[in-house]
Image (spheres, rainbow, N blue to C red):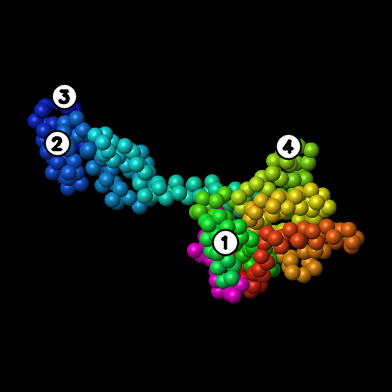
Amino acid sequence: MRKVDIKANPKDVVSFVEELKGDPLLEGYEINSWNANDFSLYRDEQKNCMKCQGLSSCKNTNPGYMLKPEDNTFVLVPCKYKKELNRQENENRKIKTLFVPKSILQADLKNFDVTTPNRKKIYEYILHFMQNLKEKTFTKGLYIYGSFATGKTYILGCIANELARNGIESLIIYFPDLVVELKNAIGSSRLEELINYLKSVDVLLLDDLGSENMTPWLRDEVLGPVLNYRLMEEKPIFISSNLDPTSEELTDHLATSKASSETLKALRIKSRLEGLVKPVELDNANYKR
């Protein structure tokens, strides 16, 4: 950046000001000896931005920002790359994750696979859900079930990211690891904090329900109260699982034994799920994300 000392030779200052006034990038601005250095920096940063390929190559004094004339002064404004980074960070803050890979934050509904009938059905239902959410109309979430390695977790990631784009906070959890965390928290305030968050978060996404070791405590003291609260308060939930909720698979898993009292408790959980989620099988078992 060329710079002059306003106390220096007046001819040099005048020459510098005239040079700036003649630059097309500064056309229309009122440039004088007192703001010439700022306009010189502004011009240089504008030129840097024209050639910039991203934040990593930013040459401006404040990376990601550029000077902008405003009301007889200069302010720092973020460039397009910085704005995009801020947008992504704001969205990511809307997504809370527990025990799921960070790569899930890259899942994008734009890349959703709709090559099979049920995948297309899931995609369309997500769009329907988002529209109803904007209109503050309660809509059931999805219970996505099917074989291993078919992309169920990726779909939950797509949903979480789409929620974040709409300013909705979500929590996505790998359920078997959550169970371990809950058991370790027994006897501490951490247990109540976790359960309350499972109840209250805007949208809850449980990944791989059914892979955990189900116990009466987990079913009756954690899963049941969480589902009941969310049903009463109309707070959506999405679930992925290998267990078919339309058959006896899920009932047998929740019952923990053949006793009739256990079956009754399992059916109570299923009843709450029916009020919260719509079951859809993820077809094409040979598919792998």
Give amino acid for label 3.
Lys
Which circle's residue, 4 or 3, is located before the other in the chain? 3
Instruction: Tell me if label 1 and label 4 are in contact, CB under 8 Å.
Output: no
Instruction: Tell me if label 2 and label 3 are in contact, CB under 8 Å.
Output: no
Instruction: Tell me if label 4 and label 2 are in contact, CB under 8 Å.
Output: no
Give amino acid for label 1.
Phe
The front one of 108 and 267 is: 267
Tag 2 secondary structure: helix
Which circle's residue, 2 or 3, is located before the other in the chain? 3
> Which residue is label 2 attached to?
17
- Please say whether residue 96 is one of the residues in the magenta stretch: no
Place of residue 69 in the rendered image (x, y in percent of width and height, measured from the top left): 26, 39
Give amino acid for label 2.
Val
> Which residue is label 4 attached to?
189
Instruction: Tell me if label 4 and label 3 are in contact, CB under 8 Å.
Output: no
Which circle's residue, 2 or 1, is located before the other in the chain? 2
Viewer-nearest of discs 3 and 1: 1
Q: How many neighbours does mark 2 have within 10 angstroms: few (below 14), some (14-19), or many (20 or more)? A: many
**Left or right relative to 70: residue 280:** right
Say above or below: 193 vs 109.
Answer: above
User: What residue do we see at 73% from left, 41% from top?
Assistant: 192
Q: Which mark is residue 7?
A: 3
**Left or right relative to 125: residue 264:** right
